[in-house]
Amino acid sequence: MADNRSSSATGGTMVQVRVIGVARDTEQQHVILLKPVDEPAAEGRMLPVWIGEQEATAILVAVQGSITPRPLAHDLMASMLHELEAEVERVEVTRIEDGTYFAEITLFTPHGLRVIDARPSDAIALASRTHTSIWVADEVLDVAGVEDTVSEPAADEHEVDEFRRFLEGIDPEDFTD
C-alpha cells in the first residue's frame, strides 16, 4: 500500500487526510474540512466534519502554530502523554452513524499500543498539536465526502468567494439518512 493508504484495526481501508480549513456553514456552525493527502487542490473529494466553537478554535490554534498564554485542553493532553512516555501514533475517523462521526486515537505507550475512543474534533486537535497523521475510513468518505470545488489555500479574493459559495451549499442535514 502507498504511504497514504492503510488498513484499520477492523480491516477496512483508510486514507490519510490533512486539515485544509475550518469555516462556518450557512447556519454559522463550525465545520472542519479534511482532504486526502494524495488529491490535488480543487480536485477529488473532501470531508466536512461539524464541530463546536471551542474545538474549532483549538484546531485553528494548532494548525496555525499560534501560542496561547495558557495551555488549552489539547495542549494539556499532549503534555500529559509526553510525561507518561506515551505518544500519539495516529488518529482515525472510523465511522459515521446517523450523522455522527466517531474517531479513535492510537497511542504508543510503554505498555504497548492502546486505542482510545474520541470525538473527531478532539482527535484532530490532538493530532494537530503532536504532528500526527490523520486517517479517515474509505466508507466515511464514501458516505459523507463531498466534491472539492475550492482551491487551497485561498490566495486571492476570487478563491475566497468560491470557497464561501461552496460552504453556503453545505448543510449538516445533508449527511443524515
Image: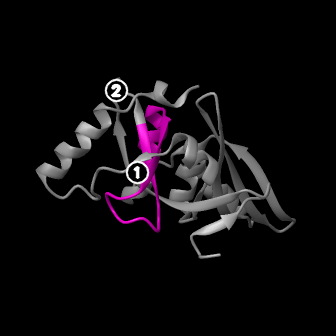
Q: Which residue is at 78% across, 54% downward?
A: 115
Q: Which residue is at 81% across, 58% downward?
A: 114
Image position, residue 139 (x, y; %)? 63, 48
CB contact under 8 Å: marks 2 and 1: no
Pick whichever of labels 2 and 1 is earlier in the sequence. 2
> Which structural element holds mark 1?
helix
Q: Residue 82's quadrant in the figure? A: bottom right
The boundaries of the magenta stretch are 31-59
Image position, residue 17 (x, y; %)? 51, 59
- Of residues 48 and 88, the one nearer the viewer is 48
Q: Which residue is at 40% across, 28% downward?
A: 171
- Of residues 134 and 1, the one nearer the viewer is 1
- Label of residue 61 in the image: 1
Amino acid at dot 2: Gln
Amino acid at dot 1: Val
> Which structural element holds mark 2?
loop
According to the picture, the residue beneath numbered tag 2 turns out to be 28
Q: Residues within 10 Å of mark 2 (few under 14, many from 20)?
A: few
Q: Residue 101's quadrant in the figure? A: top right
- Quadrant that contains the C terminus: top right
Q: Is residue 58 left or right of residue 162?
A: right
Q: Is residue 57 left or right of residue 16?
A: left
Image position, residue 97 (x, y; %)? 66, 32
Image position, residue 79 (x, y; %)? 62, 58
* Disc nearest the viewer among 2 and 1: 2
